[in-house]
Amino acid sequence: MTESYRHDGAPSEYPSEYPTTYPEASGGAGAWPAPPAYPPHTPRHRRRLRGPAGLLAAVAVAAAAIGGGTAYAFQELTGGGAGGSGSQVNGTTVAASSKGTVAGVAEAVGPSIVEIKAAGSSGQSTGSGVIISEDGEIVTNNHVVSGASQVQVATSDGKTYSAEVVGTDSSKDLALIKVQGAKGLKAASLGDSDKVAVGDDVVAIGSPAGLTGTVTSGIVSALDRDVTVSRDESQGGSGQGGGREWPFEYGGEQFNGETGEQTTTYQAIQTDASLNPGNSGGALINMDGQIIGINSAMYSAGSSQGQSSDAGSVGLGFAIPVNDLKADLDTLRSGSQR
């Protein structure tokens, strides 16, 4: 027998069935070439796993390599996570195909924004609100419903509901109302205003001049702007003459009317998204469809020195950070009137 070498370098014999000559060809026979010799240090080839077992092993290796990101990626690919078919937090969902667009945000959040009409002894006012529960909890500005004895809410589908004021907080210019007999409303997602940065794209939705569902867009212009509004019922809400005036104080000047003697100051998000009377209490929204602020004040040309003005927005609007609202929700739900 012809000698050969095993992988460990030791000589061995060919198996008896191993041919040692070629079949007859071209009139002659030839010998098989000698098998290659493997040096002692050459390792054996590892057997590769195939089929399901091999796939599981590969997944296990990948999981060990990238840790917690594997679960997120798996959810994203299979649709099992929050972003399976879009970006969803609580109620509002931005479709994946429209994510990051004004149209996508408007479509997702529009049904969560309402028009509010309030009436009281001092007159009437028009504003906006944000639905935060399916059974009809709505947040708005205190100055929209301050002193109101009757409140009506119109949803984006044209339905009208009566509402009652649950709680108010004039120190933050926030109020909570609840519609009667509603169910299955689309609640908005409340974001995190601490993550907002100057330059972020934003969308505003509200009912300026009673034009329900009006959408504007812009950026975050600045943060922590000190805005002062009235705490006096005779100055805000029903005293706004149908929503034409929107009194507030900024930088030592009063705009859109007199704020009165009883005032409160909060640190606002400034935006250049167009806001007009009637946007008050509506939503300032990030591009993921999350509420980051409640629109509360705007500057109009010619409205300084306490004079009201019918001029439109000049790109100086202010919103109460949504984290202020979230911190106040339990107090508002308790029925506190302050």
Image (spheres, helix red, strand yellow):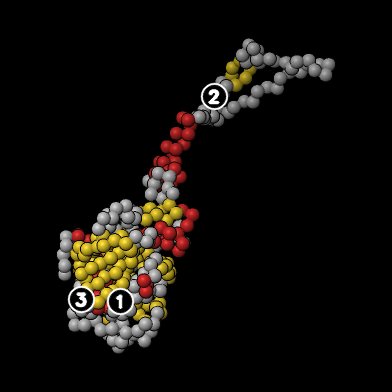
Q: Amino acid at mark 1?
A: Gly
Provide residue 327's location: percent of width, then percent of height: 23, 62
As drawn, 36 above or below 250: above
On the rendered structure, is 160 left or right of 9? left
Mark 1 surroundings: few (<14), some (14-19) or many (≥20) residues within 10 A: many
Find residue 148 and report its image quarter: bottom left
Considering the image in quadrants, where does the N terminus appear?
top right
Q: Amino acid at mark 3?
A: Ser
Q: Which residue is mark 1?
A: 242
Provide residue 53's location: percent of width, then percent of height: 46, 30
Q: Which residue is mark 3?
A: 121
Whole-number angstrom distance, CA of label 1 to CA of label 3? 13 Å
First in sequence: mark 1 vs mark 3: 3
Q: Which residue is mark 2?
A: 8
Find residue 13 and report its image quarter: top right
User: Is 265 in front, or is 296?
Assistant: 296
As drawn, 48 above or below 199: above
Q: Amino acid at mark 2?
A: Asp
Whole-number angstrom distance, CA of label 1 to CA of label 2? 96 Å
Given the current orientation, which residue lies at the most extreme right position? 27
